[in-house]
Amino acid sequence: MKSDHTQHFEQVHQKLLYQAVKKWFELAQEEDFLGREYSYYEQVEAGHHRVEKRQVWTVDISELPPLHNQKLWTGLKTVVMIVSERRLWNKTTTEARFYLSSLSSNAEKIAGAIRSHWGIENSLGMKI
Protein backbone atom coordinates (compact mmCIF):
# COMPACT_ATOMS: atom_id res chain seq x y z
CA MET A 1 0.00 0.00 0.00
CA LYS A 2 1.46 3.35 -1.07
CA SER A 3 1.29 6.21 1.40
CA ASP A 4 1.50 9.91 0.66
CA HIS A 5 3.96 12.16 2.42
CA THR A 6 4.37 15.87 3.01
CA GLN A 7 7.82 16.88 4.20
CA HIS A 8 8.81 20.22 5.71
CA PHE A 9 12.28 21.44 4.79
CA GLU A 10 14.39 24.23 6.21
CA GLN A 11 17.19 26.46 5.02
CA VAL A 12 19.56 24.90 7.54
CA HIS A 13 19.26 21.32 6.26
CA GLN A 14 18.48 21.72 2.54
CA LYS A 15 19.93 25.13 1.71
CA LEU A 16 19.94 24.87 -2.11
CA LEU A 17 16.45 23.37 -2.24
CA TYR A 18 15.12 25.96 0.23
CA GLN A 19 16.64 28.87 -1.71
CA ALA A 20 15.31 27.67 -5.08
CA VAL A 21 11.75 27.11 -3.81
CA LYS A 22 11.69 30.37 -1.83
CA LYS A 23 12.95 32.33 -4.84
CA TRP A 24 10.34 30.71 -7.12
CA PHE A 25 7.47 31.56 -4.76
CA GLU A 26 8.74 35.14 -4.24
CA LEU A 27 8.81 35.72 -8.00
CA ALA A 28 5.41 34.08 -8.47
CA GLN A 29 3.91 36.31 -5.76
CA GLU A 30 5.46 39.44 -7.24
CA GLU A 31 3.75 38.53 -10.52
CA ASP A 32 0.46 37.48 -8.84
CA PHE A 33 1.10 33.91 -10.07
CA LEU A 34 0.45 35.13 -13.62
CA GLY A 35 0.60 32.20 -16.06
CA ARG A 36 1.20 29.68 -13.28
CA GLU A 37 -1.13 26.87 -12.22
CA TYR A 38 -1.59 26.83 -8.46
CA SER A 39 -4.04 26.05 -5.68
CA TYR A 40 -4.70 28.48 -2.81
CA TYR A 41 -6.37 28.10 0.56
CA GLU A 42 -6.70 30.53 3.46
CA GLN A 43 -7.68 29.81 7.03
CA VAL A 44 -8.14 32.18 9.98
CA GLU A 45 -8.32 30.95 13.57
CA ALA A 46 -8.87 33.04 16.69
CA GLY A 47 -8.67 32.21 20.36
CA HIS A 48 -6.74 32.90 23.55
CA HIS A 49 -6.08 36.55 22.52
CA ARG A 50 -4.47 35.31 19.31
CA VAL A 51 -5.47 35.51 15.66
CA GLU A 52 -3.64 33.35 13.17
CA LYS A 53 -4.05 33.56 9.41
CA ARG A 54 -2.56 30.79 7.27
CA GLN A 55 -2.23 31.18 3.54
CA VAL A 56 -1.35 28.02 1.62
CA TRP A 57 -0.15 27.88 -1.97
CA THR A 58 0.52 24.57 -3.72
CA VAL A 59 2.02 24.11 -7.17
CA ASP A 60 2.66 21.05 -9.25
CA ILE A 61 6.36 20.23 -9.39
CA SER A 62 6.24 20.66 -13.21
CA GLU A 63 5.71 24.43 -12.68
CA LEU A 64 9.21 24.79 -11.22
CA PRO A 65 12.59 24.33 -12.86
CA PRO A 66 14.38 21.13 -11.77
CA LEU A 67 15.21 21.30 -8.06
CA HIS A 68 18.47 20.39 -6.35
CA ASN A 69 18.58 16.57 -5.92
CA GLN A 70 14.97 16.32 -7.16
CA LYS A 71 15.49 12.69 -8.24
CA LEU A 72 15.98 11.76 -4.56
CA TRP A 73 12.38 12.80 -3.76
CA THR A 74 10.57 9.74 -5.09
CA GLY A 75 6.92 10.44 -5.89
CA LEU A 76 7.31 14.22 -5.57
CA LYS A 77 4.23 15.92 -7.05
CA THR A 78 3.78 19.23 -5.25
CA VAL A 79 5.69 22.09 -3.67
CA VAL A 80 3.96 24.00 -0.87
CA MET A 81 4.38 27.40 0.75
CA ILE A 82 2.54 28.31 3.94
CA VAL A 83 2.65 31.87 5.21
CA SER A 84 1.45 32.20 8.81
CA GLU A 85 0.66 35.56 10.34
CA ARG A 86 0.12 35.49 14.11
CA ARG A 87 -1.25 38.42 16.08
CA LEU A 88 -1.01 38.22 19.86
CA TRP A 89 -2.11 41.37 21.64
CA ASN A 90 -0.17 44.12 19.83
CA LYS A 91 2.58 41.95 18.31
CA THR A 92 2.41 40.45 14.81
CA THR A 93 4.83 37.84 13.48
CA THR A 94 4.99 36.34 10.01
CA GLU A 95 6.65 33.09 9.01
CA ALA A 96 6.96 31.29 5.67
CA ARG A 97 7.44 27.51 5.59
CA PHE A 98 8.04 25.26 2.61
CA TYR A 99 7.09 21.62 2.03
CA LEU A 100 7.44 18.90 -0.59
CA SER A 101 4.54 16.51 -1.05
CA SER A 102 3.57 13.36 -2.89
CA LEU A 103 -0.05 14.59 -2.78
CA SER A 104 -1.55 16.31 -5.82
CA SER A 105 -1.67 20.11 -5.77
CA ASN A 106 -4.70 20.85 -3.60
CA ALA A 107 -4.01 23.58 -1.04
CA GLU A 108 -6.96 22.80 1.25
CA LYS A 109 -6.22 19.07 1.36
CA ILE A 110 -2.50 19.56 1.98
CA ALA A 111 -3.18 22.22 4.63
CA GLY A 112 -5.37 19.69 6.43
CA ALA A 113 -2.68 17.00 6.22
CA ILE A 114 -0.06 19.36 7.63
CA ARG A 115 -2.35 20.56 10.46
CA SER A 116 -3.12 16.94 11.27
CA HIS A 117 0.60 16.19 11.52
CA TRP A 118 1.15 19.21 13.81
CA GLY A 119 -1.65 17.96 16.06
CA ILE A 120 0.06 14.58 16.39
CA GLU A 121 3.43 16.21 17.14
CA ASN A 122 1.87 18.55 19.69
CA SER A 123 0.08 15.72 21.50
CA LEU A 124 3.27 13.66 21.60
CA GLY A 125 5.21 16.64 22.91
CA MET A 126 2.76 17.13 25.75
CA LYS A 127 3.06 13.48 26.82
CA ILE A 128 6.86 13.41 26.91
Image (cartoon, rainbow, N blue to C red):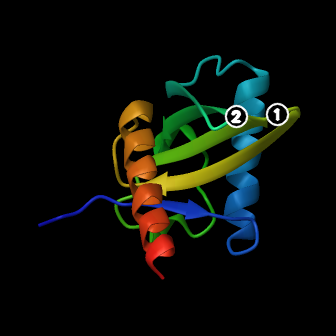
Numbered circle sitting on residue 81:
none
* Kind of residue sitting beneath label 1: Trp
Q: Is residue 7 left or right of residue 18?
A: left
Q: Is residue 79 left or right of residue 19?
A: left
How many labels were placed on the picture? Answer: 2
Nearer the observer, 79 or 122: 122
Q: Is residue 124 left or right of residue 83?
A: left
Q: Which residue is mark 1?
A: 89
**Which type of secondary structure does the marked residue at label 1 adopt?**
loop
Q: Residue placed farthest to the right in the image?
A: 90
Nearer the observer, 89 or 31: 89
Q: Which residue is painted at 61% across and 42% down in the image?
A: 81
Q: Is residue 116 above or below residue 52?
A: below
Nearer the observer, 104 or 46: 46
Q: In terms of image quadrants, where is residue 13?
A: bottom right
Q: Which residue is painted at 53% across and 27% down in the image?
A: 43
* Quadrant of the frame with the N terminus: bottom left
Task: Judge whether residue 9 can be spotted in this image.
Answer: yes
Check whether the beta carbons of the residues at disc 1 and disc 2 lie within 8 A of each other.
yes
Q: Residues within 10 Å of mark 2 (few under 14, many from 20)?
A: few
Q: Which residue is painted at 50% across and 37% down in the image?
A: 58
Q: Which residue is mark 2?
A: 49
Q: Is residue 5 above or below residue 23?
A: below
Disc with the residue nearer the chain's start (1 vs 2)? 2
Structural distance between the alpha carbons of marks 1 and 2: 6 Å
Q: Position of residue 121 (x, y in %)?
A: 46, 67
Q: Which residue is painted at 70% across and 18% down in the image?
A: 32
